[in-house]
Image (cartoon, coloured by chain):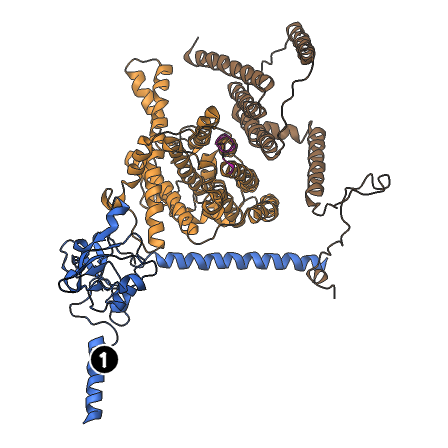
């Protein structure tokens, strides 16, 4: 399956034509998609922060940011610049090394996970075999950073927040992984590309939402909990814990937490759209339309259009989910810590297990519909 | 076994119900998104204070007879009345009068009991200062009249809820001359007067 | 030597230094929290070594299980145990230190001679790379079935034990008097077993 445009291949070919050895050409290619994705992630933070503020304002019948840039679009940039220029304070009795290391440990795994997000057939940094498993593994590093920053702040609220974050993260990792496992079971692969491929061909009808209605809900709840979004934002519950593990942080260290949480939200939405909403597939399959109009799949302009549609589709789906998350934020009240763990262990875990077993059974019974 | 199945069924039913309630809540939140913002964009828009608004107190120096009633009715004896007894005219002459608005609770007792009506409430509420001692207004400061919201060219004046026409909740873009719901105080007064004159005649 | 090999060599050196450094830190530092965090560093660097060995699945599993679960649990344990005791220097503590050092050095020497003495047979098969996930699964359900199932039984036992410990809500105020007969019982205030049905729990009348 090597249809669509192969940017890497053409880039390497171009450089080798200029007389560079193939290895050097490939090494020169490597930083390009990484920088691009980093840039895209940064832009996505701006968009998400703006969306969050505007949607929150609309849900509360306010206007929201208005004066920083047109419609307040530059508000996030203003916030970022403010954080950048703020004094970086380390509390007197805090553990300086751990205090500095904590935010970095929270942010790095999130950005690393962007490696596996495909925006099209060949529009992905690496199509590694462990794919989605890498995301689950990397997101399990984050609680260590949270524990670290909570412990090193020398503040009881920070410590409590860090402990809560770690407990919540561990608890919801399991239903999340089980929901992903059911998808993996159906697509016979951990690779994100294969998972999307398996949903392609039938437009909106082929998406995994219809085959995994329960897993879909479990994944969304668990992903919200992993991102510490509002119904589950126990670790930074303002009324109880000031701001949890972020309490003692200022300046760019706080900014890193901020960036991390928003990138994590976008990442979860992207992965959700890949797992359940068909990734870069549009609701009406492009292949079908091109077949209808009798255009060959290998036509260059069609390939460019397909790639563009793929990127737009992935981003639109992800931002729809971000919108849903923001809407949920102002709808559902925060749960208590015991309710949170009850929901995770006594409801989501058994349901996810049953869902996994059901999927396995259905896969054996109906190999056509559930990926034989 | 049946008992257990029933328990599972009840649990599932409760879960579905909870999901339904969350869905209803989401639809409420979603519905709010298409409503016009209710907030007043403060420095550019301002609500017209109501006719009985109790803002900063206005003081007329010439009317004051230094009787100190305002001090006595004040919950914390706040007004400072500095007077001298003029032996020639056998009257008190007022030198200074001041109220510290950082301490005043704007209860309006002084205004109510002032025998010469030299104290009155204004609609001014923007009294921010960099130093709390700047809030201690003397008779000159208290003699100033506030700037009216309706006359400020920089500000869009907005009516409060009670002053909007019946059924209207949005103070923006009201048609010119639209009346508030119910009767105006002067109309009530006129009615009462005409009623009494009718009764007299 | 191509570019890729050079990068691999440098990375191996870095990762090996990281593993050794962080492991020494785990053992030698007196602050137990630092030790726990450095343990996470050890696990992470080892998973980096796995990546170098072209075993991506094992590397991800290493991170998920050791960093995400084991290390977080250790940190959790350390931070939830709220027992601060003053550090009292042990008399003749140096004897213990020297003895530990000696034992460790002996073990190190023993292992080194063993490693150097063994003639390692390098497999000539090409590494499977991304196909490893399937291969590992195959092995789990064929020739490694017994250890796999035994491990799951062990985990189940641990799970049941944890549930029994965690469900014990009523700890009696006084310890039981007859210690011999209750040796195998956990101290617990006697309570009625809750019947499974909803009606059952509502019918004390």
Residue B79 image-quadrant placement: bottom left
Q: Which chain is blue?
A: B
Residue C201 screen position, x and y as percent = 71, 60
- Foreground pick, A106 / B110: B110
Q: Is residue A155 magenta?
A: yes
- Letter of the chain that mark 1 sits on in the rendering: B
Along the horizontal axis of the image, is B72 left or right of A177?
Answer: left
Along the horizontal axis of the image, is C59 left or right of A113?
Answer: right
Residue A173 screen position, x and y as percent = 54, 39
Along the horizontal axis of the image, is B200 left or right of A193?
Answer: left
Q: Is residue C81 magenta?
A: no
Tally of numbered tags: 1
**Residue located at (63% from left, 10% from top):** C121
Tag 1 residue: B188
- Foreground pick, A119 / C189: C189
Residue A336 screen position, x and y as percent = 54, 49
Along the horizontal axis of the image, is A366 left or right of B90?
Answer: right
Most common SS among magenta residues? helix
Give chain C's shade: brown
Residue A80 screen position, x and y as percent = 32, 35
**Local secondary structure at mark 1:** helix
Image quarter (top left, top right, bottom left or bottom right) of the C terminus of chain B:
bottom left
Residue B148 image-quadrant placement: bottom left
Q: Which chain is orange?
A: A
- Foreground pick, A312 / B135: B135
Image quarter (top left, top right, bottom left or bottom right) of the N terminus of chain B:
bottom right
Write down the region rendered in magenta: A146-156
């Amino acid at each position: 399956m090597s249809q669509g445009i192969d940017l890497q291949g053409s880039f390497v070919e171009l450089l080798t034509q200029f007389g560079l050895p193939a290895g050097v050409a490939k090494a020169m290619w490597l930083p390009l998609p990484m920088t691009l994705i980093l840039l895209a992630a940064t832009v996505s933070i701006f968009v998400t922060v703006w969306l969050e503020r505007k949607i929150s304002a609309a849900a509360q019948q306010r206007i929201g940011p208005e004066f920083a840039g047109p419609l307040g679009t530059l508000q996030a940039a203003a916030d970022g610049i403010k954080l950048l220029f703020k004094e970086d304070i380390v509390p007197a009795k805090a553990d300086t090394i751990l205090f500095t290391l904590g935010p970095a440990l929270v942010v790095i795994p999130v950005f690393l996970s962007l490696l596996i997000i495909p925006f099209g057939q060949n529009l992905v940094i690496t199509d590694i075999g462990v794919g989605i498993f890498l995301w689950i593994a990397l997101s399990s590093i984050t609680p260590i950073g949270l524990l670290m920053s909570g412990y090193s702040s020398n503040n009881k609220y920070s410590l409590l927040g860090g402990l809560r974050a770690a407990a919540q993260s561990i608890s919801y990792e399991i239903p999340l992984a089980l929901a992903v496992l059911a998808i993996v079971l159906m697509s016979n692969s951990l690779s994100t590309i294969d998972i999307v491929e398996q949903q392609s061909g039938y437009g909106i009808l082929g998406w995994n939402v219809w085959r995994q209605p329960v897993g879909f809900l479990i994944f969304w709840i668990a992903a919200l909990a992993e991102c510490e979004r509002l119904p589950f934002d126990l670790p930074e519950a303002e009324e109880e814990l000031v701001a949890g593990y972020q309490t003692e942080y200022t300046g760019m260290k706080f900014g890193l937490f901020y960036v991390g949480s928003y990138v994590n939200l976008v990442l979860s939405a992207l992965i959700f759209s890949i797992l359940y909403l068909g990734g870069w597939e549009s609701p009406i399959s492009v292949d079908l339309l091109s077949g209808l109009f009798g255009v060959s799949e290998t036509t260059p302009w069609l390939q460019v259009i397909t790639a563009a549609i793929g990127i737009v589709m992935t981003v639109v789906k992800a931002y729809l989910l971000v919108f849903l998350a923001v809407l949920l934020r102002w709808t559902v009240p925060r749960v208590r810590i015991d309710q949170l763990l009850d929901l995770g262990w006594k409801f989501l875990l058994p349901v996810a297990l049953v869902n996994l077993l059901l999927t396995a059974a259905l896969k054996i019974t109906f190999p056509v519909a559930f990926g034989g | 076994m049946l008992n257990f199945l029933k328990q599972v069924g009840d649990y599932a039913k409760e879960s579905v119900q909870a999901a339904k309630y969350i869905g209803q809540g989401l639809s409420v939140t979603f519905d709010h998104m298409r409503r016009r913002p209710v907030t007043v964009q403060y420095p550019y828009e301002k609500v017209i204070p109501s006719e009985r608004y109790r803002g900063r107190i206005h003081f007329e120096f010439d009317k004051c007879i230094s009787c100190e009633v305002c001090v006595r009715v004040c919950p914390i004896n706040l007004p400072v009345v500095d007077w001298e007894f003029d032996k020639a005219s056998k009257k008190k002459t007022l030198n200074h009068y001041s109220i510290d608005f950082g301490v005043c609770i704007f209860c309006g007792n002084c205004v109510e009991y002032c025998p010469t009506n030299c104290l009155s409430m204004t609609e001014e509420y923007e009294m921010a200062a960099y130093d709390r001692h700047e809030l201690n207004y003397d008779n000159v400061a208290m003699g100033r009249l506030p700037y009216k919201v309706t006359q400020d060219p920089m500000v869009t004046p907005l009516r409060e809820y009670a002053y909007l026409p019946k059924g209207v909740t949005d103070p923006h873009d009201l048609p010119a001359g639209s009346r508030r719901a119910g009767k105006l105080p002067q109309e009530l007064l006129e009615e009462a007067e005409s009623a009494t004159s009718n009764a007299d005649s | 030597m191509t570019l890729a090999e050079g990068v691999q060599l440098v990375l191996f050196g870095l990762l090996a230094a990281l593993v050794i450094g962080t492991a020494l830190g785990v053992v030698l530092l007196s602050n137990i929290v630092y030790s726990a965090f450095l343990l996470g560093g050890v696990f992470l660097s080892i998973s980096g070594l796995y990546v170098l060995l072209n075993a991506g699945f094992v590397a991800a599993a290493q991170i998920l299980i050791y960093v995400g679960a084991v290390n977080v649990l250790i940190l959790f344990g350390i931070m939830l145990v709220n027992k601060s005791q003053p550090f009292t220097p042990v008399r003749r503590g140096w004897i213990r230190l020297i003895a530990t050092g000696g034992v460790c050095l002996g073990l190190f020497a023993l292992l080194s001679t063993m490693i150097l003495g063994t003639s390692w047979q390098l497999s000539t098969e090409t590494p499977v790379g991304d196909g490893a996930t399937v291969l590992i699964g195959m092995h789990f359900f064929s020739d490694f079935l017994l250890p796999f199932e035994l491990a799951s039984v062990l985990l189940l036992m641990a799970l049941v034990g944890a549930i029994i410990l965690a469900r014990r809500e009523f700890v009696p105020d006084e310890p039981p008097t007859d210690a011999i007969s209750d040796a195998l019982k956990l101290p617990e205030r006697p309570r009625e077993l809750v019947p499974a049905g909803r009606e059952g729990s509502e019918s004390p009348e």
